[in-house]
Amino acid sequence: MEKLTRRVQAAAGKRPADLVIKNGIVLDSYNLELIKTDVAIVDGVIAGLGDFEGHHIIDADGKYIVPSLIDARVHIESAMVTPSEFANAVLPCGVTTIVTDPHEIANVCGSEGISYMLQDSENVPMNIFFMLPSSVPSTSFENSGATLSAEDLKPFYEHSRVLGLAEVMDYPSVAHTSPSMIQKLFDAQNKKIDGHAAGLHSNALNIYKSAGITTDHECITAEEALERIKRGMYVFIREGSVAKNLKQLIPAVTERNARRFMFCTDDKHIDDLINEGSVDHNIRLAIQEGVDPLLAIQMASLNVAECFGLSTKGAIAPGLDADFLLLDDIESFSISHVYRAGELVAESGKTKMGTKVTPSNRITSSVHLPTLRKDHLNLAVSKEEANVIELIPNQIVTKARKLTVDHDENGGFVSCSRKDLMKLAVIERHHHTGNIGLGVVKGFQFHDGAIATTVGHDSHNLIMAGTNDEDMIKAAEVIQEMQGGLAVIRGKKVIGKLPLPIAGLLSDKDYPTVIEELEEIEKALKEIGAPDHFNPFLTLSFLSLPVIPELKLTDLGLFHVGEFRHINIDE
Amino acid sequence: MEKLTRRVQAAAGKRPADLVIKNGIVLDSYNLELIKTDVAIVDGVIAGLGDFEGHHIIDADGKYIVPSLIDARVHIESAMVTPSEFANAVLPCGVTTIVTDPHEIANVCGSEGISYMLQDSENVPMNIFFMLPSSVPSTSFENSGATLSAEDLKPFYEHSRVLGLAEVMDYPSVAHTSPSMIQKLFDAQNKKIDGHAAGLHSNALNIYKSAGITTDHECITAEEALERIKRGMYVFIREGSVAKNLKQLIPAVTERNARRFMFCTDDKHIDDLINEGSVDHNIRLAIQEGVDPLLAIQMASLNVAECFGLSTKGAIAPGLDADFLLLDDIESFSISHVYRAGELVAESGKTKMGTKVTPSNRITSSVHLPTLRKDHLNLAVSKEEANVIELIPNQIVTKARKLTVDHDENGGFVSCSRKDLMKLAVIERHHHTGNIGLGVVKGFQFHDGAIATTVGHDSHNLIMAGTNDEDMIKAAEVIQEMQGGLAVIRGKKVIGKLPLPIAGLLSDKDYPTVIEELEEIEKALKEIGAPDHFNPFLTLSFLSLPVIPELKLTDLGLFHVGEFRHINIDE
């Protein structure tokens, strides 16, 4: 009440505003025009456009004043930093609101993981909204850290920053109306429901949309995008670290349908966020592709706000949150200042620090590996040929190959650099089961050493690949010590590591430190012979994802996606 | 749950749809294109676009299938029929959803009036959403039937069909942050708040928008419309019985800002609704003015749904309510069939009947007049000249004149047809106060008789104008007998009447009967000399509205709006 009164009084000129931005050129997001006007702000909310007096005056000096950006969908975990640190990293990109899906941490820590993400993002100078992970675990072909039923999710809908249900990716469960999936969808009917409609066409889209799923971020062609728009879905145009869809999708956008399009990053690594940007990068790319800059900005702000019902976001207008950017130039979208709720939160690429929540013990003690012995890694192959996972650089699909492998005196598989064949292991790390899945992978090209990570989609067990068992055993030891993270081992020595003690997924350090550690990792990878043209850790982290073809490895062994069953190494 | 399951199963082709519309051309409201596809419907909701089997097949025979229409704002009371009867009247116009503001009945019956409107609209084959009257009473210069405080309104927000707070028209209260107004606005901050921003410019619009008021239906120029859009308001383009704004506003609409525009009727009489249409008329006019027909239809459907957060309305797409029209032709917007929730509700201008609620006694017993004697109507004028209200045909503003009037032997005012001066009376009818306000009106041109009505904005006291006291007394008697309505008297005989027993505002009859009664009234008006070029009852009903300049009459006497006070007849 008091704030509403103060705001109206300031609008009426009966009291000075807290802050007035003068001499700027404001984006009118509704008419898509630029207008010369001052902006008055009270209690973090815009009170008026026009002439105002204020306690504090900022001279925009002819700069453009545009709404700050909203990332429609992002997995914070892909940046390997905490939510509060993520805010520090992307605020300079002009992003003051994100919609996140804590899918990865939920697979490790369940409800507690979601609670941690909500808590850690509570007091940051950014609006971090949540969609609840719909598919934990992703499959039953592996052991994840947690299971989230509809009943587990329900209490979270009470939280003011929870907007709905995140990417529904289990198409078969929807299409077959599995009761547990229908219950999750039903509980979210009055909320937002994001889809993951990769490769789905007309009938499948009918199924998704009739179930209340209203967005998709997995389009890869303009035709796919238009097919989704036609059925009333919103399309998120994604530019992440790996998936880059903007150039393919942007031809689908016209002034008549643009309101149904917006931008997201989905999965973007911390170094890419720092070097290239967040959805500000999508805007720049769209402008390069010929989109009207004002429309591109609208797509990254007003359209997302409308899609998610964030009625006080997305434009520079009275009654809306004072979340805005000062731009030096609109064509190049060069950001000089970032304001959120009327406070300067970033300037020339630098940000204030947020408040961090200390994660609970369950979250920081999530890695429970068996003490590995050599015999644990013994992979008996009774035939000359074995079923081998062949990786494809920069893709998350693999090829299932049958290849001749080398054997030791006991008939066990032996890595061979010449043939580019290495041992692959997935070790259950959540529940002390001691489960170890073993396999053979082709394509990493290491001449030496081993790599290991607790980032292993989607269950995030320990996954490692090595040229010898000793280095793999050492890798597991290091990972256990760090309570998760990335490690590169050579000659039983740690030559690169990145600790991720929070759920085995997130660093507890600031992002510049994480970037340094990543650089160390990169150097180490070169030492063991990793090629330049793909990211071995990223590739490794998807070799355990049993929903993507063709052959994968889980803690329960090799999984053939086409045949939809576990197979033996030598069958 | 069961419905969701059935819908998804039908989308997946695992069960036949309830209904499939084949051979139609469907409006894709999101891309603004026409597409050839069948539409499958289950449980009143669209399950898919594509090829489907159904229990029931309808051959659209090449007709256009477009979303049915939403009137963004309408006072049902202006049609003088009950909500259920209103539905019968406008369903053939293709309108299956309306947002109504029961402002008039609330001024008579308060909360009970709103409850009646909600109940009567519960089981009709139309979605009738409500905005809560924000200004009951409109002013303190007269006695209305009820007062609605913020506290009175609050319980109604629990109702699923109540969307927010209706036209905030008391600009001074907002601008001066009167606590009672701020409380009403505060309670609706997470709902929708409609504005009534007639004539307001930049600073006043800042005040309104910063208070959370997001719509306006009172623009009369394109510039005004753009000024509102710029501040993030939605603009309702109105075509009512009196206020007709479309031709002036439509030039403001472009493909870049069209999403902020929609259509409404606001106040439209039953005969105009039947003869001309509801917002379907706005669509036809817009098309005539050069708007792309697909965009015009989008304005009357999807845009309204988005504005009011009606996420299952506004387009033909899976998961949305099966509210749609079959059109013979799109350019002329000629409607052949109207479906609501998959049911045929109107065909070739004919509709099914809704269910009526019997109004409670309080609602049907709202007229409490004193037994009038001649001396009640004695209007002493001590000078030769009197303050006279001069009506302006087809406007709700009046002129305040000082004119020479005739006197009887006791110094009382005497009507004079030659001078076109008649007696005007407003009699309080809600609380048995016996208050009678008397005045003189110029402009009705009757040579004979009297007219009276309980539709008197905004307090809806009895208002009557007559050439002689006897006919006025008879008129009051008839109105009392009918418990409200319209009456035309000549020579102490009733020559035309329209009973409005529900709150003195609504008929309890069907709309064809009301139209017949209106025709009888029109004939009677001609008998007493009423001219053709304006509607005397409409004019009369606004002579008591003390918020519109220049001179008005309430039950407390003459009110000079410019001086903002009651004045004497002869001061």
Image (cartoon, coloured by chain):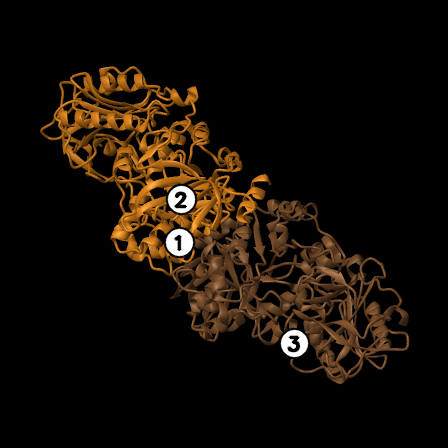
Chain colours: A brown, B orange
Left or right of A339: which side holds A549? right
Check contact, mark 2 vs mark 1: CB within 8 A: no
- In the picture, the disc for residue A393 is 3
- Give the Cα separation between the discs numbered 3 and 2: 50 Å
The mark that comes first in sequence, 2 or 1, is 1
Circle 1 SS class = strand
Residue B407 x, y percent position in the rendering: 14, 23
Q: Which residue is found at the position 53% from the left and 34% from the top?
A: B155
The chain ID associated with circle 3 is A
Q: Which residue is found at the position 82% from the left and 57% from the top?
A: A431
Q: Residue B2: which quarter of the image?
A: top right
Residues flagged by tags 2 and 1 on a common chain: yes
Q: Which residue is mark 1?
A: B36
Residue B310 x, y percent position in the rendering: 47, 45
Q: Which residue is found at the position 90% from the left and 77% from the top?
A: A409
As shown in the figure, which amino acid type bears the numbered disc 3? Pro
Left or right of B513: which side holds A304? right
Looking at the picture, does residue B261 appear above or below residue B394?
A: below
Q: Which quadrant would the C terminus of chain B be assigned to in this image? A: top left
Residues flagged by tags 1 and 3 on a common chain: no
Q: Nearer the viewer, residue A39 or A34?
A: A34
As shown in the figure, which amino acid type bears the numbered disc 1? Lys
Check contact, mark 1 vs mark 3: CB within 8 A: no
Circle 3 SS class = loop
| Of marks 1 and 3, the one in the foreground | 1
